[in-house]
Amino acid sequence: MILSILSAFISTIGFSILFHVQKKHLLVCGVVGAAGWLVYLIGENKEYSAVLSTFLASLLVTQISYILAKKRRTPITVFLIAGIIPLVPGLPLYRTMYFLMMNNYTLAANYAILTVQIAGSIAGAIVIISLFPLIWRKRSSRN
């Protein structure tokens, strides 16, 4: 488990370097990615589905990214995009393509559905956390 979290940390930093994130943010991006992956692994250990585990991890990554963006006065995308990278459903997408090439359309469809569900859970978590400040402002302005 520790090796997996370390791998997520390093891969997040690598992705951040590839996309020219400033050096002062690299370690923080790595921590965000590792934290998201830790939550994903905890969900997997508790036998949650991959979709729910990804959703919970994405909620955490998005919330941390918002906090860090304000604290470091940096666009949220610096932390959010880098932090989400370990959660992107690469293996199910690969398996979808593999089973399409092997003419096993049933398994290809199953993995395609899983890929869309995981990607949708990532997007849904980002939207939910992004809406909280808007809802909070509207409630504050009414009072």
Image: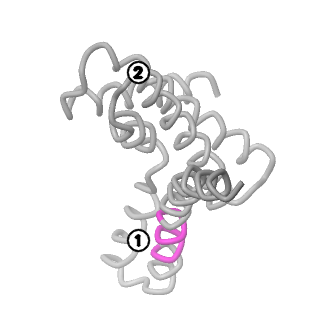
> Element type at marker 1?
helix
Please report whichever mark, 1 or 2, sits nearer to the chain's N-terminal start: 2
User: Is residue 63 found left or right of 98 in the rendered image?
Assistant: right
Q: Nearer the viewer, mark 1 or mark 2?
A: 2
SS majority, magenta: helix
CA–CA distance between discs 1 and 2? 39 Å
Look at 39% across and 38% down and name the residue there: 76
What x and y, as percent, mark residue 118?
53, 63
Q: Quadrant of residue 134?
A: bottom right
Look at 30% across and 27% down and name the residue there: 14
Look at 51% across and 57% down and name the residue there: 122
Is 67 part of what is drawn in magenta?
A: no
Look at 45% across and 44% down and name the residue there: 84
What x and y, as percent, mark residue 87?
49, 47
Residue denoted by label 1 = 96
Q: Quadrant of residue 19?
A: top left
Q: Which mark is residue 72?
A: 2
Mark 1 closeness class: few <14, some 14–19, many ≥20 residues within 10 Å: many
Which kind of residue does numbered mark 1 sit on?
Thr
Q: Please give the range of residues in magenta.
A: 112-119
What x and y, as percent, mark residue 39?
66, 39
Q: Is residue 41 above or below residue 111?
A: above
Q: Is residue 55 above or below residue 30?
A: below
